[in-house]
Amino acid sequence: MKHVREQFIAAPIHVTGYVDGAFAAADGADIPVTDPATGKQVAILHESDADTVDRAVRAARRAITSGPWAGASVAARQKALIAVHDAILENADELAALETLNTGIPYSQTRNIHIPRAAHNFKFFAEFINQDGGEVFTQEPGYMSLVTYEPIGVTALIGPWNMPLGLTAMKMAGALAFGNSCVVKPSELTPLTLYRLFEIIDRKGIFPKGVVNLVNGNGAVTGNALSAHPDIDMVSFTGGTETGARILSALAKGIKGGAMELGGKSASIVFDDADFDRALDGALLGSFMNNGQMCLAGSRLFVHESFADRFLEAFTRRVKALKVGDPFDPATEIGPMINRAQMDRVIRYAESGLGEGATLLAGGRAHDGLKDGFFIEPTAMLATSNALSICQDEIFAPFATIQTFRDEDDVVARANDSRFGLVGYLWTQNLERALRVAAGIKTGTVLINTPIMRDLRTGFGGIRQSGIGREGAKGSRAMFTEMKSTIIALEAPKMPKLGAGA
Ligand code: NDP
């Protein structure tokens, strides 16, 4: 699959938007798209300006007010979703190669995990809408009350660069399953796989015109024009906390809602009764998968002091042994950071950690042997306090911090001492402890004895600055529908007759 790199470097493709069933003209500002493993340009993104965004939103509005998608049957929506699922799998090799080329995430992970998961979202929601219905209440004599879920309308779906297709596919699948139209905006850094998916969808004629639209460009220009557009009905956003806050304030002006999947700094607590090897494997995967660029990374480790020395020694040895290299090399475990700014930021965090009294166990600097791309050495630091910036800020990189603890209440308090609240990881073989601590952890999800697991039947999302809303099954339904109550009297209501004494 390495040939994809040569092919794109030799002839960078032109990425535009897709509006009302046609690719937009390449007329916006040119933004270079880079392969983070080589620093070379692989595509030219032509920014969608406010006018293109406006046309996309108007096309999405038309698609749900007239035409075949307006009130489309469950069967019609399922057929379209399954067609997207099949199309992703048919093109999985190429989509995985593009994802790796654009993000630097090892091909072994994009091909085996991210692309199949992107496809799975469409199948999952196709099946979910077949089972899902409203509710009927008959307990009140003389009345029947119905709860139905209606499409919310035009959805704006804005995604990040760390898992561009997988995370945005989840939004698209949910929004479309519940009968909405969408305008998708990928990160300007990583537009390639969504652009290719739209090409495939267009070629196969899966959706009526205007149901799915794509706008590409910088967050401040294209993203802002989309999230502030008066005719969108909601934004489903995955990205950083500051951007999420900006989008929420734009939405507040129109009294509209937004689903926000934001940052995290998740604690991973290894108790003294944990299965040592399983916890060690899980802690490594939870911190270093996806180049460590995961919102749900469990990279703030707490290890019980009774075996901290042994754990630290084994963890450090494995971090130093992580294979950093070309993400297309099957042996590579860690690829490059997304860009130079992110690489420099990671190194600054290692320096600030040292300045604040943490001990460097591994890494903390740019990779000596790989100077073309944005490679850093996988990093682990022993932290003296949870207050250090390396324990409080989301570094979004292959960077783990370790603290030791003695007491259960103390470690729960420290785990909760964070402005984020996405995931809590617990490693223990004691069922009572697992459930007791899980109840005390202030996060949207708790994972017990497993790293980075997501289950679409449950909801995923965060509390505090990790976000608002849950993605998956009923969480996505809440996000992408309006709940409507219809109350019907089955006989003359037993109510006072006003004015009847006249
Ligand atoms: P950003 O917040 O920088 O960007 C996310 C998206 O928002 C991009 O498409 C960006 O465009 C766009 N954007 C930027 N400014 C605006 C604006 N004013 N209006 C509308 N859109 C805008 O996040 P990153 O791409 O850097 O992603 C990393 C972050 O995402 C991390 O904090 C991570 O934790 C979080 N994340 C959360 C997940 C979750 O499920 N909770 C999952 C994965 C990641 P552009 O890039 O073109 O500027």
Image (spheres, rainbow, N blue to C red):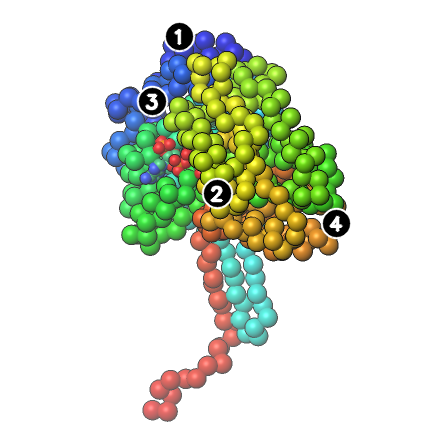
- Circle 2 residue: 388
Q: Nearer the viewer, mark 1 or mark 2?
A: 2
Q: Quick one: label 1, few (<14), some, or many (20+) residues within 10 Å?
A: few
- Circle 3 residue: 45
Circle 1 SS class? helix
Q: Quick one: label 4, few (<14), some, or many (20+) residues within 10 Å?
A: few
Q: Tag 3 or tag 4, which sits nearer the N-term? A: 3
Q: Are marks 4 and 3 in contact (CB under 8 Å)?
A: no
Query: Spatial distance from mark 1 to mark 3, Cα to Cα?
Result: 16 Å
Q: Are marks 4 and 2 in contact (CB under 8 Å)?
A: no
Q: Is residue 459 above or below residue 2?
A: below
Is 266 in front, or is 78?
A: 266
Horizontal and vertical percent for residue 157?
41, 38
Q: Nearer the viewer, mark 3 or mark 2?
A: 2
Q: Tag 1 or tag 4, which sits nearer the N-term? A: 1
Q: Is residue 81 visible?
A: no
- Circle 4 residue: 430
Is 493 in front, or is 54?
A: 54
Q: Tag 3 or tag 1, which sits nearer the N-term? A: 1
